[in-house]
Amino acid sequence: MKSELFPLSFKDQGKGKPLVLLHAFPLTSAMWTPQVEAFSELYRIITPDMRGFGASDRFVGTPSVDAAADDIAALLDHLGINEPIVLGGLSMGGYVALAFARRHPQRLAGLVLADTRAEPDDDTAKANREKQIELVRTQGPAALIDSMMSKLTSTITRTWNPGLIQRIFEMATAQTPEAIVDALILLRDRPDSRPGLPQIAVPSLVVVGAEDVITPLEVATALRFAIPKAHLRVIPGGGHLSNMEASFPFNLALGEYLNGIRF
Ligand code: MLT
């Protein structure tokens, strides 16, 4: 849904306490379909599209995780949601969720950090973003997603679930080069979120696909130990896009967490 009154497109489905889920790069809110299907009887699930993705307007100023986090706070205001939410984000969505935890801690009841990290890009990662920006500008989104697919997904998914690989490819290639370049700038320039982790006061769930090579288990483990009230769940069969690749164990972990915090 996209109204003239708000810059982000988003879906608002189900009834119950609010669960907001932030998508990965270079995808859209549609990646959360397995979670919406599983949980919308129990929770109100709000899935926004990041600036430039889906039908959302592009960033007005410099793309940043802080601006993206403030968009989510503005979305809650737009929807009249004042009660604390559980906020979940996968990879890029997790970077934005960490910025939200820093900037709007009073609005959080819980935090789900899936296949993500608190560290900023190092010099090698920044140089790789530059190459990706060049690739998207010269050859378009399909060339970028082709170059990323083997890292985004597990061998199991690529071998046994070609339909999902096709859906991921279609979701990514439907995005504009401008949106993808803006997001690459946001990813490249994101700050170090590690100093804020000990201040996260809400019960948190760190999730990682067992086969994730972009944000592997050791990265998730560091996140889990830096956040005081965090638990870690490893998702068998999942790569970096664990919520789609291994939706059943992912949903089990998410459901147990939500139930456990009595949300
Ligand atoms: C993502 O899945 O959002 C990206 O892999 C994030 C990143 O490249 O840092």
Image: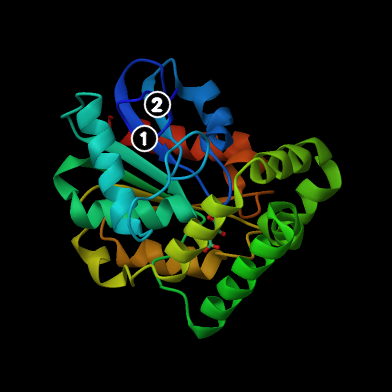
Drawn side of residue 168 relative to residue 231, left or right? right
Residue 95 picture location, percent across and down: 40, 58
Q: Which of the two discs, 2 and 1, labels the residue nearer the N terminus?
A: 1
Q: Report helix, strand or loop for mark 1.
A: strand
How many dots with numbers?
Answer: 2
Q: Is residue 97 left or right of residue 209?
A: left
122 or 145, which is in the foreground?
A: 145
Residue receiving disc 1:
20
Residue at the (35%, 60%) spot, across then down: 64
Contact (Cβ within 8 Å) of mark 2 with mark 1: yes
Give amino acid for label 2.
Answer: Ile
**Ligand 1, what quadrant?**
bottom right
Q: Quadrant of the C terminus?
A: top left
Query: How busy is the neighbourhood of tag 2: few (under 14 within 10 Å), some, or many (20 plus)?
Result: many
Quadrant holding the N terminus:
top left
> Judging from the image, what secondary structure is the residue with disc 2 in?
strand
Residue 178 visible to an observer of this rendering: yes
